[in-house]
Amino acid sequence: MDAILPTREQAEELIPPPDGIVCRIAGDARLFAASSYAVILQVAHPTVGAGVSEHSNFRADPWGRLLRTLDYTTCTIYGGPELAWDVGRRVREMHKQIKGVRSDGVRYHALEPKAYAWVHATLAEAIVKGHQTFASPRLSDAEVEQFWREWLPAGRLVGVREGDLPETWAEFRKYFDGMVRDELQHTDSVRDVIETLAKPTRPPMPWLREGAWKVVRMPASRGGRVALEGLLGPELRERFGIEWTRAKDREMRAITAISRRSGPLMPKAAKNFGPSYLGWRRDAIARGEVASGKGAKPGIRDTAAA
């Protein structure tokens, strides 16, 4: 038993409250546009990037990491304390095996507290920035502060220690800017993410046939890459060798404007996909298609944020 993890009873106090702001905004499907932003922030950390390069097949299966992260966040936010506690332990256990030597010769382990906490921080950054960019109405400063108060304790479910991340959003902004300035690098995994976005593979969705994917891939990949580059901001774009042109800026403005206005047209399931995803997840586990429940078929990769 990992002593750093909370007890099953403590999980109820750590998950975001059902009537809170995290539950209200995190299930908006428009936030998918910020998913690659979270991933690239994560893998720009030298330890996380090395772990993904050596222990993941991101190039062959880019959707796998996104779906595993989606599984973790959705289960934590919407699944209730029992599921959140179970998934948190699975995520922690899986990361124990991720270690090696970085390209600069430094030994690493995925459970290094600073790197491990950074992953939890990037998810909050992507949700908040994704909402502020692609959804409406925009969050007030007080709402963002409340979001962080609800999000921060959930990190303990995967073993992020108290004190590893700032207590307030105002302090978080200083922490985040410091990480960008002093820690994040143009790692091999960053290059993999950027190159994969240029020509993404078909998502693992049975209803999306190869022919249909060829039709939508170009506009989808173009829009996704522009959204990522726009979210990164000038400092990281320069570090990653990304040119930001007036044409891209116009595209980004158009994407955000259309996305913000789409709210009234979105079906209920798209405004909050959490319950729908959990229903699909239960059915998939019952069929043995996802290794996230007891009795699942062996040999299928566990769903986790890795």
Image (cartoon, helix red, strand yellow):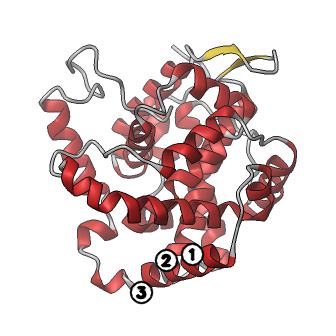
Seen in the picture, residue 232 relative to 83 is either above or below; the reply is below
Seen in the picture, residue 81 relative to 102 is either above or below; the reply is below
Q: Secondary structure at mark 3?
A: helix
Q: Nearer the viewer, mark 3 or mark 2?
A: 2
Q: Quadrant of residue 213?
A: bottom left
Q: Quadrant of residue 238?
A: bottom right
Q: Secondary structure at mark 2?
A: helix
**Foreground pick, 67 / 58:** 58
The residue at the point 58 percent across, 19 percent down is 54
Q: Is residue 293 left or right of residue 121?
A: left
Which residue was labeled with disc 1?
Answer: 252
The residue at the point 61 percent across, 73 percent down is 248
Q: Amino acid at mark 2?
A: Ile
Q: Amino acid at mark 1?
A: Met
Q: Is residue 5 left or right of residue 46?
A: left
Circle 1/circle 2 CB separation < 8 Å: yes
**Foreground pick, 202 / 113:** 202
Residue 302: image location, x then y, percent? 36, 25
At label 2, counting other C-alpha atoms closer than 10 Å, the crowd grade (few under 14, some 14-19, many 20 or more) is some
Which residue was labeled with disc 3?
Answer: 261
The numbered mark, 3 or 2, whose residue comes first in the sequence reads 2
Q: Amino acid at mark 3?
A: Arg
Q: Which mark is residue 255?
A: 2
Between marks 3 and 2, how big is the CA–CA gap? Answer: 10 Å
